[in-house]
Image (tube, helix red, strand yellow):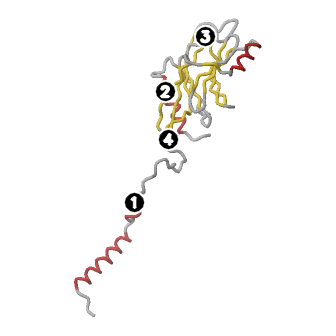
Amino acid sequence: MRIPIRLTTAIALVVLSVVGSNNTSTSSAERFVAPVPPGLRSITGQAAAKFSSAYTPLTKCGSGMTRKEEKEAEEHGSDIPTRCKGYDGYDIYIYYSACSSNFSVDRKDESISLGMQAIDWKQKTVEWRMAQIDGKAKPFAVIMRVYEYSGNDECATGGKITGESLIVKGLKGFEHIDATVKVKGTPNPNVKAREIADKGYAQPKP
């Protein structure tokens, strides 16, 4: 049976095409990169995050105790702490002593100290750095302005204000974020504090 010349030529071209394809360094299948589904983690285990800020006003806070606990505190002459609602189960608590106010971030058994301040503290807000992954934002650090005092005979947080800083504290899982930014002499200290927090988020956990 004779095969038509045109058909023979066509077969030869197909064979050459296949052979030539096998000799190339990268086939079309190897060049194809499948799109990564949303939310898929990278090989480092960390998906890309978008950073933003949320704020807790310290001027609109309530009691850090239940009514029963308040009554017991009053009977014993104890001070009632202030509770300012935060994010993701975290709250800002302010505990009082004779001449100082102790700020902390609390969630259940977790407690992160933000330092001691004067009894008549001047802070108005606490900033939360948020990381958004897969459309859900969660806090990973807090930024708060703190003051330094000259002190007096009664209390270390008494007297005149001698300086101020922004403290950056990481929440659970990000405890390695721990920095202080001096307000005086630092251009855009708030921006600097945010940069420190965001950089700490991306760093491998120790």
Mark 4 lies on residue: 133
Residue 57, percent from left and from top: 53, 20
Residue 119, percent from left and from top: 63, 11
Figure quadrant of residue 69: top right
Mark 1 lies on residue: 32
Residue depicted at 49% across the width and 30% down the height: 195
Q: Secondary structure at mark 3?
A: loop
Q: Residues within 10 Å of mark 4 (few under 14, many from 20)?
A: some
Query: Are the residues tagged 2 and 3 within 8 Å (C-beta)?
Result: no
Q: Residue furthest right?
A: 76
Q: CA distance from mark 4 to mark 3?
A: 39 Å
Figure quadrant of residue 15: bottom left
Q: Relative to 189, is 91 on the left or the right?
A: right
Which amino acid, mark 1? Phe
Mark 3 lies on residue: 120
Q: Earlier in the sequence, mark 2 or mark 3?
A: 3
Q: CA distance from mark 3 to mark 1?
A: 64 Å
Figure quadrant of residue 61: top right
Rendered position, 64 above or below 11:
above
Q: Earlier in the sequence, mark 4 or mark 1?
A: 1
Query: Are the residues tagged 4 and 1 within 8 Å (C-beta)?
Result: no
Judging depth in this view, the residue of 105 and 44 nearest the camera is 105
Mark 2 lies on residue: 192
Q: Earlier in the sequence, mark 4 or mark 2?
A: 4
Q: Residue furthest front?
A: 67
Q: CA distance from mark 4 to mark 2?
A: 23 Å
Q: Earlier in the sequence, mark 2 or mark 1?
A: 1
Q: Residues within 10 Å of mark 1 (few under 14, many from 20)?
A: few
Which of the image's four quarters has the N terminus?
Answer: bottom left
Residue 91, percent from left and from top: 60, 26
Q: CA distance from mark 2 to mark 1?
A: 41 Å
